[in-house]
Amino acid sequence: MSLKILIAASEVVGFAKTGGLADVAGSLPRALAARGHQVAVVMPYYRCVRLGRIPIERTHHVIPVPVGLRTLACRLYRATLPDSQVPIYFIDQPEYFDRDDPAAGKGLYQQNMPGGYKADYPDNAERFVFFSRAVLETAHSMSFIPDVIHANDWQTGLVPVYLNEVFRTRPQYENTRSIFTIHNIAYQGMFGPDVMNLTTLPGWLFNHAQLEFHGRFNFLKAGLVFSDVVNTVSPTYSREIQTPEYGCGLEGLLRVNRMKLFGIMNGVDYDAWNPATDKHIAANYDDATVFDVKPKLKAALQARYKLPLEPDKPLLGVVARLVSQKGIDLILSAAPGFLDMGCQMVFLGEGDPEYHNELIQFRDKHPKQVGIFLGYDESLAHQVEAGADLFLMPSRYEPSGLNQLYSMKYGTPPVVRSTGGLADSVVGATQETLAAGTATGFSFGEYTANALYQTIKWAVTLYRDRPKDFQQVVRTAMKQDWSWYRSAGDYERLYLRVLGR
Ligand code: ADP
Ligand code: GLC
């Protein structure tokens, strides 16, 4: 049965991206369309969309969107997702979205402040109140009345609220259902209570069972409470967030709502992330040729990071937003140990200025072993995945994680902490899993530098002294199939369930 599905997200790969949400919002719609559904995507018309490589078409649709006491006009722009017929609509409102400029330190949600600190834009609440409301107005204006509206993360948390409180009274929307996906519960979009005025929603919704969280306005909670089903991006994370350690204060609410909470692991877009066809790397390979080709790519990566071209030194790669989630502190604490073992390491990332400074000091102290690139670079991300021998992802928490899925495909076994989607996707090498031929990486449980160090040591032992075992891990990792086809099937079942079909 073909469904009409509207997907709203604050970033979509190819147009605007800060992390994995963009990858999901770009791939899931195409995978759903490939299964026969009618899908449309909505995102803001940021400056980077306007100036980007993909041609955008201006439509004649101009829709009025109320925010507080004002009604703003919003023009719709349109494109299709790359290699697909899936339409993507862009919501234009220059006051809110035409401001990002990496050269001036202005991102999608944050800007650099004097002293190197990043601060959220002061009007983020207003920007995403506007966006959430505009999502529904867009669908209406395009006469795309969805069976399911799928919202993602706090920026779209009010979409299910507007559906229930404003649009439900219109007969066309009587049967429309909503799903809300939590990609990261640590970012909840919390603001002062005055945001209520911006929403134009009835004031009585600001109560502790609905939009209020300890006196503040909470977008993510709004999405959770008002949507018909909620999911997170891996089964393990859906359980973890029901505990105080991972729930960021919302664990109680999630436990109460556990009957409508699901976990669906993210997939990979193997058109974009496949070493056999990747245009960002100097030579292509698959599981039959990986050991012939990888040395060239490793040398190229060492050269790019100005490291000595040492073919036999284990090269550890990291690609991550540099935030506490990603375990950068563990890597830095464990580093003396693994540098002593003769490892080299390369970082690609940007984020908190403290990590930038620490990484610069780390590199300056070990210029022959450590390379860093502080910034965002799509091609380099592919080159690190391909050229490194091991990929480090010792996350404190990880809702799903995509990089470990990419690194497996690239024959670069991930070294992960067993949490969230990392636990659900990586089979750590042990004597047993090696004997069974199921190991796809290396994993540890405790969030300590020593646990990470011991695990890297074990991986390096295999790399150096047990090459057959190491090669088996590489090949098994490369053979894993994390394509979207399966995850899109899980979403389809969830949509049908919420529609009662
Ligand atoms: P998260 O969404 O928490 O950042 P994921 O592993 O799900 O983590 O996805 C991260 C995505 O962002 C991957 O596609 C990764 O390659 C990309 N990425 C992160 N940092 C950078 C960077 N500095 N340059 C290029 N790509 C990056
Ligand atoms: C978040 C999570 C990451 C996940 C991504 C896409 O950014 O941190 O684990 O893969 O969303 O769902």
Image (cartoon, grey):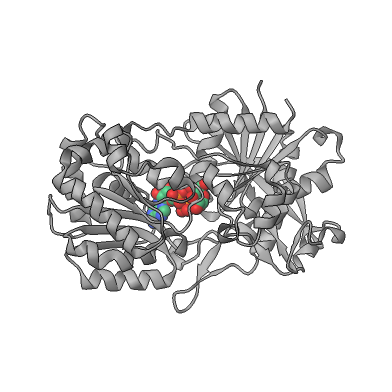
* Quadrant of image for the N terminus: top right
Residue 462 vs residue 22: left or right? left
Q: Is residue 281 visible?
A: yes
The single residue placed furthest to the top in the displayed view is 1
191 or 106: nearer the viewer: 191
Up-down: is 137 above or below 220? above
Measured as percent of width and height from the top left, residue 156 is found at 66, 51
Measured as percent of width and height from the top left, residue 14 is found at 47, 44
Measured as percent of width and height from the top left, residue 367 is found at 19, 67
The single residue placed furthest to the front in the displayed view is 432
Residue for point 76% across, 35% down: 176
The single residue placed furthest to the bottom in the displayed view is 115
405 or 25: nearer the viewer: 405
Residue for point 53% across, 25% down: 34
Measured as percent of width and height from the top left, residue 129 is found at 71, 57
Up-down: is 214 above or below 291? below
368 or 338: nearer the viewer: 338
The number of numbered badges drawn on the structure is 0
Residue 448 vs residue 72: left or right? left
